Amino acid sequence: MTYVAGRMQVKPNKQPVIVSVPICHYEDTQSAKASRQQLKEAIYASLFDMNVPAVCAVNQATLALYAAKRTSGIVVNIGFQVTSIVPILNGKVMRKVGVEVVGLGALKLTGFLREKMQLNNLTFQSLYTVRTLKEKLCYVALDYEAELSKDTNASYEAAGEGWFTLSKERFQTAEVLFKPHFAGVQAMGLHQAIALCVEHCHFADLPGDNDWYKTIVLSGGTACLPGLAERVEKELHTLLPPYMFNGVRVIPPPYGADTPWFGAKIIGNLSTFPGHWCVTKKQFRQKPRLSLIW
């Protein structure tokens, strides 16, 4: 925090801080609630020890939704090791409805591409090179079987390592999201987990707009792969009955990998900020068990 404040040339004791909190402890159980509470208190205590005047802690999924200029919907966050499908109503995570978690993320896709490259005798010096090739060359096929018959060769020059040419690996890598068994993972596909979350939201029959869950926002660096939003929407059209699917809109990360940051920026620019968004040091010391929005 001291380093960041120095780089920004601001005084920590003069600026409220917005913290993006990892999506974790998903369940609506007492143990999960206790873990979330413990994490909250650790974050707040650490920042207040640095004399920050007020802190606003919001989970990454909610920030991604705000970046899409929505307060209700489903956020699909493809993280480093897991993917989370998070229903959010009026800015609040609906854990009682159910957060779906798929046990694969960006690391698994990078590892899958590495193995494909090794099988094709493509040599590289580091996993960073593989990740770069994933980000620059890979994409999601709208129709996987049809894509197999196409010429999909493309090349990219990686800094310090020269040119690499990939072919079917370009779309086979992202296909792991829909067919986890390609990478040896026993889990439901991304589209199946999203459809399950949509069904839970529909039958939860919560007050307010009946279609609140039909905006689906993608988040995370891997979610920026071209074609992902279109493929997810196509798969949901197949999996869901018309009365659930009609009106569904899948939105790519509005600001790329930095989407949660832009969500925090929107909060910071509100006329009501810090106001009710933040907890002050005095409030935290008086009521360490405050119920916070994430």
Image (cartoon, rainbow, N blue to C red):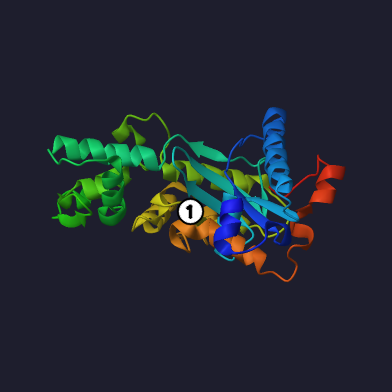
Count of marks, rendered view: 1
Work out whether residue 152 can be spotted. no
Q: Secondary structure at mark 1?
A: strand
- Asked if 186 appears above or below 278 in the picture, the reply is above
Q: Along the line of sight, which residue is nearer the eye, 219 or 284?
A: 284
Q: Along the line of sight, which residue is nearer the eye, 106 or 250?
A: 106
Residue 226 picture quarter? bottom left
- Asked if 224 appears above or below 120 in the picture, the reply is below
> As drawn, is 92 to the left or to the right of 23?
right
State the image coordinates of residue 164 (x, y, percent, origin top left).
16, 51
> As drawn, is 170 to the left or to the right of 282?
left
- Asked if 156 appears above or below 81 in the picture, the reply is below
Q: Along the line of sight, which residue is nearer the eye, 66 or 150?
A: 66
Q: Along the line of sight, which residue is nearer the eye, 123 or 98?
A: 123
- The residue labelled by disc 1 is 219
Q: Residue furthest bottom?
A: 271
State the image coordinates of residue 187 (x, y, percent, origin top left).
42, 32
Residue at 58% of width from left, 61% of height from top?
263
State the image coordinates of residue 78 (x, y, percent, origin top left).
45, 46
State the image coordinates of residue 211 (x, y, percent, origin top left).
61, 58
The amino acid beneath tag 1 is Ser
Residue at 27% of width from left, 45% of height from top?
130
Query: Local crowd at mark 1 within 10 Å, few (<14), some, or many (≥20)?
Result: many
Residue 274 picture quarter? bottom right
Residue at 48% of width from left, 53% of height from top?
219
- Asked if 227 appears above or below 48 in the picture, the reply is below
Work out whether residue 110 can be spotted. yes
Residue at 84% of width from left, 49% of height from top?
283
